[in-house]
């Protein structure tokens, strides 16, 4: 494709907006993201007989959760998002804070990559969460 045409037709993404997640227990998920990450409930409601909530933080990251209690424990057989990653201000305190919340780190304490460190764990619904110290694993540092 011609470079000028490609530039005209390229959609410029300015920032990440939200992740939508199906959860089996809305209250448990709300507590987890409030207690562990400090997210606050922004909106909640019922649509088509499905309870939902939008949670956000000061950095304007949003989690949209829809409750499907009848799907608890059902394996997703299609392609899936493998994890959600967050960058934090004080990475050195992350492991201790996660332990305070009773979070288990299945991969051990932390993983050292070439330019950054990360920890991985599961939320109450089995979504894998990554916490890193640098954007993009430090590749642009």
Image (cartoon, rainbow, N blue to C red):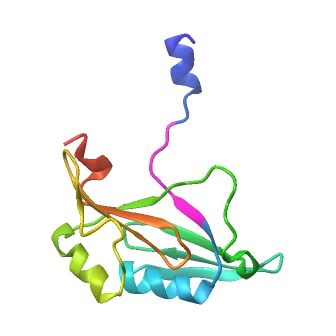
- In this picture, is 65 found above or below 118? below
Identify the residue at image location x=22%, y=67%.
89
Which residue of the protein is positioned furthest toward the top in this rendering?
2
Is any atom of residue 61 visible in this view? no
**Quarter holding the C terminus?**
top left
Overall secondary structure of the magenta stretch?
A: loop
Q: Is residue 116 left or right of residue 53?
A: left
Q: Is residue 24 left or right of residue 136?
A: right
Image coords of residue 105 (percent x, y)? 33, 72
Image coords of residue 47 (percent x, y)? 78, 76
- In this picture, is 138 found above or below 41? above
- In this picture, is 21 found above or below 115? below
Image quarter of residue 104: bottom left
Q: Is residue 19 magenta?
A: yes
Identify the residue at image location x=72%, y=77%.
68
114 or 43, nearer to the observer: 114
Identify the residue at image location x=19%, y=44%.
114
Q: Which residues are magenta?
A: 12-20
Q: Is residue 92 left or right of residue 9?
A: left
Q: Is residue 140 left or right of residue 24?
A: left
**Quarter holding the N terminus?**
top right
Which residue of the protein is positioned furthest toward the left in this rendering?
92
35 or 46, nearer to the observer: 35
Image quarter of residue 54: bottom right
Image coords of residue 83 (percent x, y)? 47, 58
Q: Is residue 125 magenta?
A: no
Image quarter of residue 11: top right
Is any atom of residue 41 visible in this view? yes
């Amino acid at each position: 494709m011609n470079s000028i045409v490609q530039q005209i037709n390229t959609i410029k993404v300015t920032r990440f907006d939200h992740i939508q997640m199906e959860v089996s227990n809305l209250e448990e998920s709300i507590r987890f993201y409030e207690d562990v990450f400090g997210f606050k409930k922004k909106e909640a409601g019922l649509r088509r007989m499905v309870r939902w909530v939008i949670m956000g933080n000061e950095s304007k990251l949003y989690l949209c959760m829809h409750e499907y209690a009848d799907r608890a424990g059902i394996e997703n057989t299609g392609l899936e998002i493998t994890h959600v990653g967050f960058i934090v201000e004080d990475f050195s305190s992350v492991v201790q804070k996660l332990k305070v919340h009773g979070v288990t780190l299945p991969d051990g304490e932390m993983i050292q990559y070439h330019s950054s460190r990360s920890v991985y764990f599961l939320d109450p619904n089995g979504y894998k969460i990554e916490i890193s110290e640098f954007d993009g694993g430090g590749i642009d540092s």
